[in-house]
Amino acid sequence: MDVLPGGALIASKRGARNQSLATVRQADKLSDEELMASMAEPEVEAALSMLYDRYKRTVFGVGIKLLGDRSLAEELVQEVFLKVWRLSESFDPSRASFSTWLYRVTRTTALDLHRKRARRVRPVPDEDHQHIATARDTSATPQESVEDSWLSWQVSRSLEELDGALREVIDLAYFQGLSQREISQQTGMPLGTVKTRTTRALKRLREKLMAQDVSREALR
């Protein structure tokens, strides 16, 4: 998950990588929408790299939610950001934010990956020869988890916007299952500080989620 998807493809079209530190720093200051507008410019690789860094964890997390498989979620990340580059001209900031647009791309790509996995070809012996039969995966489809995945997307984006100290306690508590005392022991942080930061982080998350459009717009 540390390799920029499509990097080799972009390099083959634009020559060897010559991305400077100054270009990366400049990209870091741009909004998602401004980065998308840079896709047709020489800074395309820096723009795509920055979007990848901002959203790779969110896409991966929703991939786990929709596909239930780590390797497929990793494949999803690669496919999604390749599509971000290829479909950049279809992005219209007047119709949706980049985050909402990217969620739609992620959802569609996840459904495609699920359909590919669902079809299995296996030989079936017959009296004279082998017939090829198609076996379908009967597990639940990602469509059944779409609403939950949208909420997961919003929560993940809100987490990314928290400062590092607040995000750390949430990560340890809710994604690694540590108690507040265990967080204190692992990080060396005073228990009172852990409790204070957890309370503050949850309050910030609640405020961010209430301020966001968590309607069904992205599910259409």
Image (cartoon, grey):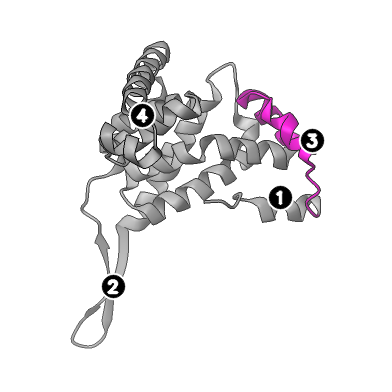
Residue at 18% across, 87% down: 127
Tags 4 and 3 touching, CB below 8 Å:
no
Per the image, the residue denoted by label 4 is 190
Q: Secondary structure at mark 4?
A: loop
* Displayed quadrant of residue 191: top left
Q: Is residue 22 positioned above or below 216 on the image?
A: below
**Amino acid identity at mark 1:** Ile
Distance (Cα) linking label 2 and label 4: 58 Å
Name the dominant secondary structure of the magenta segment: helix
4 or 3: mark nearer the eye = 4
Mark 4 burial class by Cα count in 10 Å: few <14, some 14-19, many 20+: few
**Amino acid identity at mark 4:** Pro
Distance (Cα) linking label 4 and label 3: 39 Å
Extent of the magenta region: 16-40
Q: Quadrant of the C terminus?
A: top left
1 or 3: mark nearer the eye = 3
